[in-house]
Amino acid sequence: MSKPGCPICGKPVDPTYRPFCSKRCADVDLQRWLAGVYAVPASEDESLPDKDQAED
């Protein structure tokens, strides 16, 4: 079983920058999060009333 590589470039992971191989790849990942490239999916909770209905 092989060790997982850097999620950005696939090179072997450096323990200093785990789970990345370098500061550069860690910075690339951070930039992707800040730019909104990555997003955590969310769903509306249908059990809560809509804002428009709550005002009536």
Image (cartoon, rainbow, N blue to C red):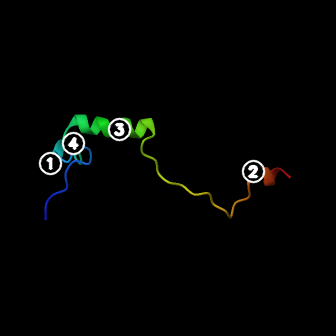
Where the N terminus falls, by quadrant? Answer: bottom left
User: As shown in the figure, which amino acid type bears the numbered disc 3?
Assistant: Leu
> Picture quarter containing residue 48?
bottom right
Which residue: 43% across, 35% down? 35
- The answer to which of marks 1 and 4 sits earlier in the sequence is 1
Q: Secondary structure at mark 1?
A: loop
Q: Quickly name the residue at label 4.
A: 17
- The answer to which of marks 1 and 3 sits earlier in the sequence is 1
User: As shown in the figure, which amino acid type bears the numbered disc 4?
Assistant: Tyr
14 left or right of 52 in image: left
Q: Quickly name the residue at label 3.
A: 30
Q: Residues within 10 Å of mark 3 (few under 14, many from 20)?
A: few
User: As shown in the figure, which amino acid type bears the numbered disc 1?
Assistant: Pro
Q: Quickly name the residue at label 2.
A: 51
Between the C-alphas of marks 3 and 4, the distance is 13 Å
Name the mark on residue 12.
1
- The answer to which of marks 1 and 2 sits earlier in the sequence is 1
Q: Position of residue 13 (x, y in %)?
A: 17, 48
Between the C-alphas of marks 1 and 2, the distance is 49 Å
Which label sits in the foreground, 1 or 2?
1
